[in-house]
Image: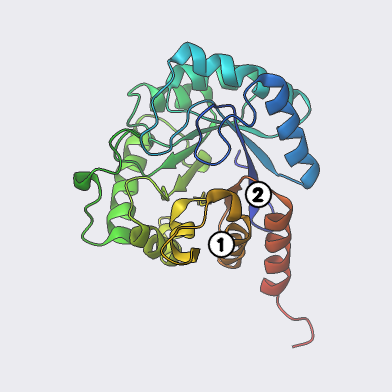
Amino acid sequence: MIPRADRTLVMGIVNVTPDSFSDGGSWPDADSAIAQGERLLAEGADLIDVGGESTRPGAARPDAEEELRRVIPVIRALAGRGAVVSVDTMRAEVARQAVAAGAGIVNDVSGGLADPQMFAVVAELGADYVLMHWRAHSATMQQADRLHYDDVVADVCAELSGRVDEALAAGIDPARLVLDPGFGFSKTVDHNWTLLRGIDRVQHLGYPVLVGVSRKSFLGARLGTGGTARPPAELDDATAAVSAWCAERGVWAVRTHTVAAHLDAARVMRELRRADPGA
């Protein structure tokens, strides 16, 4: 079942890709990606999310064979070391092989929309499933028709609820569902900030919530100077601030490129949320 703790969990990112927006090419092969996963575990990561497809705006998709080549050795190695591993994939066959290699969680940024077999395969596998709000693949997700919301928080919640209904109808155990509001996916800068402020409303849907904002451009857009956005590599401190915000609100987990600062934020908020025994 979904990992739990008395604080917000920290999911460390391992992108085995040449073109991810922040760290593409940093871990281009299995050995370097495994080493990065081990570094994140040493920092205290509760979970490791391994992905072989970039979902930055405009990114081209690798084929399934290439995605499998990238992720399976990494998943097998990290799971063999006792890590709780999530596979970041939109493909049912990749999910199937990843779970066979040791992944316990399928993190599907498309919420089952990219592959019509995903829900059935996840139900069959009995894996935990992260269902994200999504409207289109990377090549078109920031087009104007994908960016219209009457009320971004209400609309995201409604669209997530619809996908949850489909997932449950396909046989996915509700105790294995996690929701992700999809920061940066078919959202403007303002949408992302509004959605983050409204994260309580996403939690009110009744499922654990994963927040993934690490190094994302909407943070840099507000923190830059002179009209120039701050680059992703300079957004780890800002991401840690968001992790503290999420931990204070009891979010299930945050997905981050680094771990230590986010784990500290979660621990501090756990202490602050405790009732004062002297009161």
Residue 211 horizontal side relative to residue 4, left or right: left
Q: Amino acid at mark 2?
A: Val
Reading the image, the residue beneath label 1 is 242
Identified at 54% across, 16% down, the residue is 68
Identify the image quadrant of residue 11. top right
Residue 261 horizontal side relative to residue 180, left or right: right
Q: Residues within 10 Å of mark 1 (few under 14, many from 20)?
A: many
Per the image, label 2 sits on a secondary structure element best described as strand
- Asked if 142 appears above or below 71 in the picture, the reply is below
Of mark 2 and mark 1, the one earlier in the sequence is 2
Numbered mark located on residue 267 in the image: none
Given residues 238 and 204, the one toward you in this image is 238
Provide residue 179's location: percent of width, then percent of height.
45, 47
Given residues 204 and 27, the one toward you in this image is 27
Provide residue 78's location: percent of width, then percent of height.
72, 27
Residue 111 horizontal side relative to residue 143, left or right: right
Reading the image, the residue beneath label 2 is 10
Q: CA distance from mark 2 to mark 1?
A: 12 Å
Name the residue furthest front: 226
Q: Amino acid at mark 1?
A: Val
Per the image, label 1 sits on a secondary structure element best described as helix
Name the residue furthest bottom: 279
Quarter holding the N terminus?
top right
